[in-house]
Image: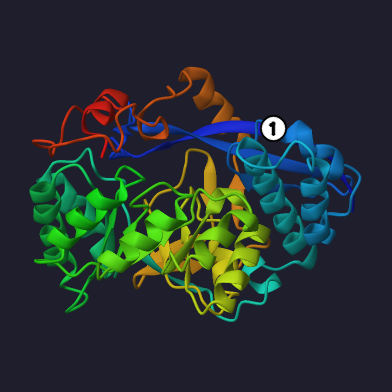
Amino acid sequence: MKVTGYRSLTTAHDWGRLIGDANGVMPEPRTDVHVLILETDSGVEGVGLGAHGDIERVFGAVEGEDPRAVSAIYDRMLDRVFKTGHSGATFGAIGAIDMALWDLKAKAAGEPLWRTLGGRDRFVPGYASGLDIALDDDALVRLYERFAERGFSGAKLKGGRNLEHDLRRLKALRDVFARNSAEPALMLDANESWNRSQAVRYIAALEQEVDLTWVEEPVRRWDAAGLASVRRGIRAGVATGENLTGLEQYRPLLDADAVDIVQVGNVWGITHFLRVAAVAHSRDLPVSPVAYHTNPVAHAAVAVPNHLAFEVQDLSAPIGLHVDQEFEDGGIVLGDEPGIGIRVDEEHINAVRAADPPAAIDGPHVRPKRAGLRLVPDSGQGDRNGARAGERVGS
């Protein structure tokens, strides 16, 4: 079996609601989902997800290779961009290819990827995370009741703009998930919108009334000293890592004893997750993947000893993607389809795509100009128009 080429598709996920975080809100309830299909001379195809616009920079390291040598090919891709660097969009392309290679490897073995990776149990413990900052309180409760009905006992709230607003919503989540646990896990994600002093003051105030399991990305992702300072100043754990692209970016944070929960983005691939999990395990730290559509890294989560909980952002799949997994008992139940368990209906995707314009680049992916530079709290949820809201309330 040899890799001979690839196809790229763009589908969409229909959230049925607006999504966002402290930096802004997406302008529409549909967001783009990028799909990569690796072709082989045997006719078997591998599926990977995530933006891969830089694929031509690294595909030369993959073309003509046997996909079953996936770990070695991963390093070949990194070597391919040795001088110019592998971060950002290039690391995303590497991650999408890596997923597709693992998909091919498991399909060649005729088994689901979680089996190929050495997993014993198909169940992946999770927590609910609705990207929920655009919702009013009633809609927030309705959303998380759907997760509670599936057995989830914890949730992560998007916040960081207004203390009273976040406190009220955290208490509402505690009430929702009390049906499944006497002490539900409550997390708050500030998405790098504070400076270290703001973070400590804000979280310490919340902790007077709610017990937080962790605070996520309280300051910038690379700020080892800042994350360590926040960690010393609050009771909750500090979680970060979803935007780090390569083991070398974790090293300063781990050396500074700045992290309690080591996070990994799904879009960076299976091999990256496995390597980060091993490094975290060497420090006796748990690892927690940050979700992406279809939750592909869930297959790897069951194969590491230090997986804590998997972020689940929605209970449905993107348009044209059929995923062999269920949501039960507060987590993800992986299926038995060979590979990563994603079947792609290209005809349906192309038909839908032809009828809909591309999604706008706006919202939480664009950092506000005034992020971290605020003297007084926001008076409420703020403007829902993405970047403008972020500019006004950015800390």
Residue matched to label 1: 54
In this picture, residue 268 sits left or right of residue 42: left
Residue 121 in the image: above or below residue 24: below
Residue drawn at point x = 65 percent, y = 45 percent: 96
User: Total of numbered circles in the picture?
Assistant: 1
Q: Quadrant of residue 179?
A: bottom left
Q: Residues within 10 Å of mark 1 (few under 14, many from 20)?
A: some
In this picture, residue 310 sits left or right of residue 196: right
In this picture, residue 146 sits left or right of residue 349: left
Residue drawn at point x = 46 percent, y = 56 percent: 224
Instruction: In this rendered view, identify the residue nearer to me: 329 or 365.
Output: 365
Residue 108 in the image: above or below residue 38: below
The image shows residue 292 at horizontal and vertical percentages of: 48, 49
Evaluate whether residue 158 shows in this view: no
Instruction: In this rendered view, identify the residue nearer to me: 281 or 71.
Output: 281
Query: How is colour applied across the structure in the image?
Result: rainbow
* Three-letter residue code for mark 1: Asp
The image shows residue 367 at horizontal and vertical percentages of: 38, 32
The quarter of the rendered structure image containing the C terminus is top left
Evaluate whether residue 260 shows in this view: yes
Instruction: Label 1, secondary structure: give it.
Output: loop
Q: Quadrant of residue 151?
A: bottom left
The image shows residue 237 at horizontal and vertical percentages of: 33, 68
Residue 296 in the image: above or below residue 193: below
Instruction: In this rendered view, identify the residue nearer to me: 191 or 321.
Output: 191
The image shows residue 208 at horizontal and vertical percentages of: 10, 66
